[in-house]
Image (cartoon, rainbow, N blue to C red):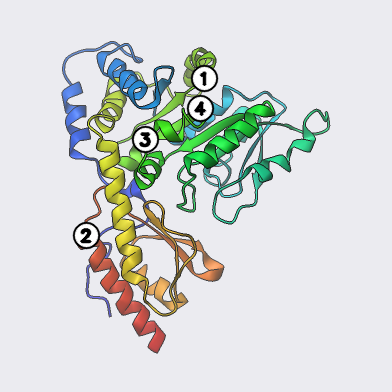
């Protein structure tokens, strides 16, 4: 039987984690006197400069409240009423945003089957026969997630190949970058190499999963799209009045590589967790560990027993695949205690 107290550390999501001390400090430092509202403050200017330093001089960043809002506002910049978005069947915009893009923008999402959360040029090519056909929604955007909802990463070359193909056919490439930091840390590259240099047109940048209290951004890498975003952000209810407190969080993450430090640590904890259960009989990984998520298949009884003590999600109930996510504040001690309980439960259920 397990002896640890219930829910000692959540492995359900990096959204369950607290706020990084440097981010809290930045918020407190921004809480000094009055400042112009709606982004006319020095903290937002600093955030804009920090994003340009990471993504290139032509990048424009708009701080926002959440990832769904950043995705919807970004897609709204390039979609017409009769357009469609091609995305993986696992895409967050398709499965976990309550139909926000379709409801707010009136656009059609076309989910593409995928084995590991990633789509390829061939997947996109198969949808282009609709171009020019008035009976079909027109493919306009290819949307990918980095990292994917399966915890896998696109390489810079894979993204560039998708971008080149999309642009050759008049399509835009959008990236849901909720965990872009984890991908860059895992691949040992810059944020720019996976976005600007690879041909991405626009992306949502995740801060909340990386240690922020609540801060995301829409990053536009095609200058001609930047101005309309001002109006769509307001229309989309993503314009913060006291924006300095959102911007300060993003600047903190983008200063002195804190985003990379946080993401690399979270990734390392996921690898530690996966390595700690690798030799257990009856346990296998559904996807390779390439970020801060682990997707193991467990004995059915083990899933129920572990969920009495730990928070985590079941990914595929039919095959008893669960999802464990680590965060910037997950410690080796948290992971090792979890591993010990996993090993105990799996061994007990195997013998029952």
Residue 101 versus residue 180: which sits nearer the camera? 180
Of the residues under marks 3 and 1, which one precedes in the sequence?
3
Instruction: Give the residue displayed 26% in from the left and 76% down from the top.
Output: 2
Image spot of residue 300 (x, y percent): 47, 75
State the SS at label 2.
helix
Circle on res. 202: 4
Q: CA distance from mark 3 to mark 2?
A: 26 Å
Of the residues under marks 2 and 1, which one precedes in the sequence?
1
Residue 66 versus residue 251: which sits nearer the camera? 251
Dot 2 and dot 4 residues touching (CB under 8 Å): no
Query: What is the quadrant of residue 99 in the picture?
Result: top right
Dot 3 and dot 4 residues touching (CB under 8 Å): no
Q: Which residue is mark 2?
A: 332
Q: Which residue is mark 3?
A: 190
Instruction: Give the residue displayed 30% in from the left and 79% down from the top.
Output: 344
Q: Residues within 10 Å of mark 4 (few under 14, many from 20)?
A: many
Q: Is residue 160 above or below residue 33?
A: below
Q: Residues within 10 Å of mark 1 (few under 14, many from 20)?
A: some
Query: What is the quadrant of residue 281 in the picture?
Result: bottom left
Q: CA distance from mark 2 to mark 4?
A: 36 Å
Judged by depth in the image, the label closer to the viewer, 3 or 4, is 3
Q: Residues within 10 Å of mark 3 (few under 14, many from 20)?
A: some
Of the residues under marks 3 and 4, which one precedes in the sequence?
3
Judged by depth in the image, the label closer to the viewer, 2 or 1, is 1
Image spot of residue 280 (x, y percent): 37, 77
Q: CA distance from mark 4 to mark 1?
A: 7 Å
Circle on res. 222: 1
Q: Is residue 51 above or below residue 17?
A: above
Instruction: Give the residue displayed 78% in from the left and 35% down from the top.
Output: 130
């Amino acid at each position: 039987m397990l002896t640890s107290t219930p829910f000692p550390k959540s492995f359900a999501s990096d959204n369950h984690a607290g706020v990084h001390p440097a981010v809290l400090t930045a918020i407190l430092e921004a809480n000094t006197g009055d400042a112009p509202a709606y982004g006319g403050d020095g903290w937002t200017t600093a955030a804009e400069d920090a994003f340009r330093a990471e993504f290139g001089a032509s990048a424009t960043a708009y701080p926002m409240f959440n990832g769904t809002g950043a995705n919807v506002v970004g897609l709204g910049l390039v979609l017409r009423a009769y357009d469609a978005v091609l995305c993986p069947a696992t895409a967050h915009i398709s499965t976990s945003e309550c139909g926000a893009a379709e409801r707010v923008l009136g656009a059609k999402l076309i989910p593409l089957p995928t084995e590991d959360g990633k789509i390829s040029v061939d997947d996109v090519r198969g949808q282009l026969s609709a171009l020019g056909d008035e009976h079909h929604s027109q493919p306009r955007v290819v949307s990918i997630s980095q990292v994917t909802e399966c915890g896998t990463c696109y390489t810079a070359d894979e993204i560039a190949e998708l971008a080149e193909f999309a642009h050759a056919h008049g399509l835009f490439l959008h990236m849901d970058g909720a965990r872009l930091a984890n991908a860059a840390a895992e691949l040992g590259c810059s944020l720019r190499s996976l976005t600007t240099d690879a041909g991405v047109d626009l992306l949502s940048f995740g801060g909340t999963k990386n240690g922020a209290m609540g801060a995301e951004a829409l990053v536009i890498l095609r200058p001609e799209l930047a101005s309309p975003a001002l109006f769509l952000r307001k229309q989309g209810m993503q314009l913060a009045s006291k924006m300095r407190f959102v911007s300060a969080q993003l600047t903190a993450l983008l200063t002195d590589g804190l985003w990379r430090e946080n993401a690399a640590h979270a990734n390392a904890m996921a690898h530690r967790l996966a390595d700690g259960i690798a030799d257990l009989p009856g346990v296998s990984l559904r996807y390779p560990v390439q970020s801060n998520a682990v997707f193991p298949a467990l004995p059915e009884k083990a899933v129920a027993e572990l969920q009495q003590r730990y928070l985590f999600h079941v990914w595929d109930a039919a095959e008893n695949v669960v999802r464990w996510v680590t965060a910037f504040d997950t410690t080796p001690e948290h992971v090792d205690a979890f591993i010990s309980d996993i090993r105990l439960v799996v061994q007990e259920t195997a013998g029952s």
